[in-house]
Image (cartoon, rainbow, N blue to C red):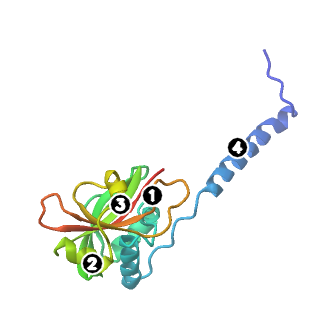
Amino acid sequence: MRCHWLAPRDTALPLLASCLLLAFGCAAAAQPAPPPPLPDNAALERWVVASLDCQADFLEGLQNRIYIERLKTLGVKFTTEWQEGDIPDGEFDLPKPVTFAGQPVTHIHYWGDSGAEFYGVVAAPPADVAKALQATPVPVKNRHDFDDRTVAVRFARTKPKGESLAPAVFVRRSEDGKQVEVGCRYFDG
């Protein structure tokens, strides 16, 4: 049995190829452009502080090979390597400390899947860090949204459409109780 195309035989294949290119081209165009790589260490410091304070979208860069390579050239040392297609989840050391909540931060943890976090570890009492950030105890109605180690939060802005809560800057005790984790938490809907 023979297939009959709506177009003549000699134009059917090019027509099909054009349709596929158009379909894939539209899908690729719908994706947001990756953030531009950071130009220098001052920009790196601003990005880290903004990410800790829920003022930057850290996940875009941490899912982009060019961005990650630029971080490495600026002296960032990843302790976990991200692979294309993986859920971002890792850690890195900064080339020099950045100051957040009045404390030096040199090590960053991050993850993103259903929600996301970007946080640093500091050696200071949780109450001092919370005061510096103007963070308050977790509201009773939101206790189920944070783990038991969370000491204080500050919601960074209004809740984005499609998310269950506004992004929150958090202060929590580390699992071993010897340090404090401070950073940003995003919530999915």
Residue that numbered label 3 is attached to: 117
Nearer the camera: disc 4 or disc 3: 3
Residue depicted at x 87% and y 34%: 7
Q: Amino acid at mark 2?
A: Lys
Residue that numbered label 1 is attached to: 165
Nearer the camera: disc 1 or disc 3: 1
Q: Amino acid at mark 1?
A: Leu
Q: Mark 2: which secondary structure?
A: helix
The CA span between labels 1 and 3 is 14 Å
Q: Amino acid at mark 3?
A: Glu
Mark 2 is surrounded, within 10 Å at the Cα level, by few (under 14), some (14 to 19) or many (20 or more) other residues, namely: few
The CA span between labels 1 and 4 is 39 Å
Q: Is residue 55 left or right of residue 146?
A: right
Name which quarter of the figure residue 100 lies in. Answer: bottom left
Residue that numbered label 2 is attached to: 131
Q: Is the N terminus in the top left, top right, bottom left or bottom right quadrant?
A: top right
Residue that numbered label 4 is attached to: 20
| Residue 132 in view, yes or no | yes
